[in-house]
Amino acid sequence: MATRAAGKLFRDFMRKRVISNSIGPYRHCSSAATPAPKIPHFSKKGRWLTGATLGVVIAGGAYVSTVDEATFCGWLFSATKLVNPFFALLDAEFAHTLAVSAAARGWVPIEKRPDPPILGLEVWGRKFSNPIGLSAGFDKNAEAVEGLLGLGFGFVEVGSVTPVPQEGNPKPRIFRLRQEGAIINRCGFNSEGIVVVAKRLGAQHGKRKLETSSASSPSSDEAKHGGKAGPGILGVNLGKNKTTEDAAADYIQGVHTLSQYADYLVINVSSPNTPGLRMLQGRKQLKDLVKKVQAARDEMQWGEEGPPPLLVKIAPDLSKEDLVDIAAVAVALNLDGLIISNTTISRPDPVNRNPVSEESGGLSGKPLFNLSTNVLREMYILTRGKIPLIGCGGISSGEDAYRKIRAGATLVQLYTAFAYGGPALIPQIKAELAECLERDGFKSILDAVGADCR
């Protein structure tokens, strides 16, 4: 693409030069003698600059023509680092909105390079090209699924989606703690509602399936790669409205409306910004809720692939007794997975020394890493490794992702680090994770899962 663009630019420029030179000698051929105009000094400078620009264009075009697609793709991802300082100057929520809009419009690079084979794995009967996902909260309303998957994530989770549209909590509600690599948010499930999200997912689902079917015919093994609509796995995170008293009814409505587009579903009972939501993590409450949602999902008609897996996202601020109860429910009801974890209401060091830490809301980013990883490790032990776990909280490098995997995570998710680092962070983390696995002699992701708990 870059080669064609450079070539076109060069041809257009030369065509204009040829036409200009061809017409030039005849412009002053009239019956009356006209003295040749004097060329001002600044015109000579202009010609010199034009020549220099032409030289750069020709040299650049010639060089790009020798560069392979993978190298050029790497340049594009690295170039996004130049935009990060601009986003840092903007209001946090406006910058977030702008980033989602850019991804929705395709103004982000597309990953053309294949993932390292060592990062591939199969979970829930689906093949992930890599275990690095984008967590819920970034694309709340499913505006940019195609663009985000194109960045090279192994999976993207949209939401949380509520049945009825709601604006969430008053602004400002997102606060940066840049020095600590953290964010505090109290958005409160701001959502456009399941009707709007369903329309978007339906349109994107159809487009992705059409593009996949029009591509070269895959082999039977390749056909199972990715999600329902093609490469990349899509998760849908379900929430409840703030004023709803029957939480199960809200989650069931989300299942009925959105599950047809989801490769997996998530019951979010752990956001600290919706009053009473975390009470649903109690043993009896969670068991009743999961049973009702599972029943709603299973009573729907499904094809050969069956219903989408159902996961629960839990908080990092749970006691040992809470974790034991959740593990017991998950094993007893054959839950398909757990996401560990959501944001924390605690303010671990060094965040507690930052004045911004006094803002209410959930803390995400680097300071959450140790807390969420400890909960992850504990849950892996309590479930005896029988349930796939998604590690989320504080990952900002391949080494961080690797530590989550060794603690029991089969898949991992980013959010805050992606908000700060942008698209260039994704290939960096994948490359670093592959190096970690090879360094310690693991042949695959699954070989490393729970290594620190054995």
Image (spheres, rainbow, N blue to C red):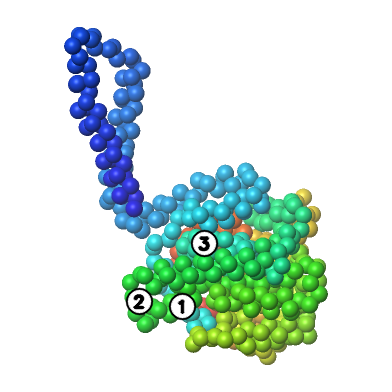
The residue closer to the viewer here, 253 or 231, is 253
Q: Which residue is mark 1?
A: 127
Q: Residue at x 37, y 53 (%)?
A: 72
Mark 1 element type: strand
Q: Position of residue 444 (x, y in %)?
A: 45, 77
The residue closer to the viewer here, 452 or 248, is 248
Q: Position of residue 10 (x, y in %)?
A: 28, 40
Mark 2 element type: loop
Q: For residue 384, what is the image quadrant?
A: bottom right
Q: Which residue is mark 2?
A: 218
Q: Which residue is mark 3?
A: 148
Q: Residue at x 66, y 47 (%)?
A: 91
Task: Say whether disc 2 or disc 1 marks the residue closer to the N-terminus.
Answer: 1
Q: Position of residue 163 (x, y in %)?
A: 70, 70
Looking at the rendered image, the disc whose residue lies closer to the viewer, 2 or 1, is 2
Q: Residue at x 73, y 62 (%)?
A: 166
The residue closer to the viewer here, 453 or 418, is 418
